[in-house]
Amino acid sequence: MEKDMQYGSDYKFIPATSIGSGVGIQVLPDIYTYTIQIVNFIAIGEPNSSDYVIVDAGMPGSAEEIIEVCSDRFGKDSRPKAILLTHGHFDHVGAIIELIEHWNVPVYAHELEIPFLTGQKSYPEPDPTVEGGMVAKMSPLFPNEPIQLGSHVEKLPADGTVPHLPDFRWIHTPGHAPGHVSFFREKDRALIVGDAFVTVKQESLYKVMTQEQEISGPPRYLTTDWQASKKSVETLAELKPVVAITGHGLPMTGQYLEESLSRLVRDFDNIAVPDYGRYIDKNIH
C-alpha cells in the first residue's frame, strides 16, 4: 500500500450482511447499483463503455468484488474516470485505497469531508444508545477514525458541476455527515442520495438483513445533526425525483417514491429522528 495512503487503525471487516448482498440492479440504462453486505455502490455509464464513474467504495475488504463488478459491466481492464464520494463514513470508503491503487483514478468529495479523508479529523463516535435496534447496538464496532488519501482526493468543484458527469450536479445535503452530498440529473430526475435518506430501516438488524423497503431518515447511529438532516431531505424532495438510489436499501421509483418522500418531509420528526440518543437536540421535536 502506498505510504501516503492508509486506513485508520480501527479499520476492519464488519460481519453484517443482507439478502441483497451480491445483487446488482440496472436502475436506468446507465445507472447500476450493487449491494456489498449492507451498503450500495453505484456505477454510472453505459455498459461496455470506458466512460464511467463510480459513486462510493463499499465496505472494508470489498475491493476485489467492486473491481469484478466493474469488469463484468464495462469490460476487462476497464477503469472508471473517477470515484465520487457521497461522504467518508467507513461503509462508503471501505475499499477506496485498494481501488485507487488498482485503477489510479482521482477521488472527489465535498470540501467539508476532506479532513476525514486526509487523516486530520475523526468522525464523532457512533451512538449505540440511540433508539433503533441491533445495528445501532453494534455500532461501536464501526470504524470512525480518519483515513489518509493524501493527494488522491480532490474537492468537488464549487460550482456544483460533477467531474466526468456533465448532466449531473452535486447538492450539499449535510446532517448525516458535514460534507455529505447527493447527485441529481435534471433530464430524467435521477437522484443518487447517499445516506441523506435511505430505503431501509438501517438500525434494525432484521430489516437490514431482509432489506424490507420503507423510506427512512439517515442511519441514526452515525447522524449527528438532525436539524441539517431535515433540511437536506426537504431540499431533495423539492427536486421531485422520479428515481432515488440510496446508500442503503433498494432503489425507489415513481409514485411510491413521491408519496414516501412527501411523508418523510411531513413527518420527519417521527419517522427519522430517534426519541433518544446522544446527538438528539431536544428542540427538534
Image: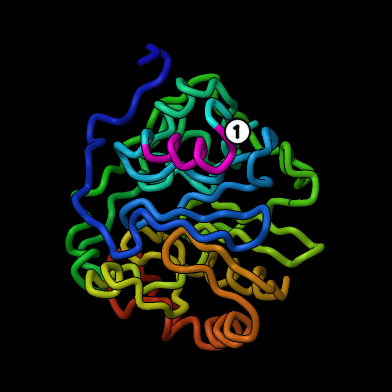
Residue 263 sits in which quadrant? bottom right
Q: How many marks?
A: 1
What residue is drawn where x is 67% and y is 57%? 29
Which image quadrant for residue 205?
A: bottom left
The residue located at (48%, 25%) in the rendering is 100
Residue 161 placement: quadrant: top right
Among all residues in the image, which is located at the extreme top? 3
Residue for badge 1: 80
Report the magenta stretch's main SS: helix
Q: Quadrant of the N terminus?
A: top left
**Percent of width and height locating residue 168:** 74, 51
Q: Position of residue 213 (x, y in %)?
A: 41, 78
User: With 206 as the anchor, is 201 left or right in this view?
Assistant: right
| Up-down relation of residue 97 to residue 90 (above or below) | above
Magenta span includes 22: no
Q: Where is residue 38 in the image (x, y as percent from the top left)?
A: 33, 58
The amino acid type, in three-letter code, at marker 1 is Pro
Residue drawn at x 44%, y 78% is 283
Magenta extent: 65-75
**Left or right: 221, with 85 as reference point:** left
Q: Is residue 73 magenta?
A: yes
- Please tell me which residue lies in front, 23 or 38: 23
Tell me if residue 283 comes above or below residue 173 in the rendering. below
Name the quarter where the C terminus is drawn. bottom left
What residue do we see at 58% from left, 85% from top? Answer: 256
Q: Is mark 1 on a helix, strand or loop?
A: loop
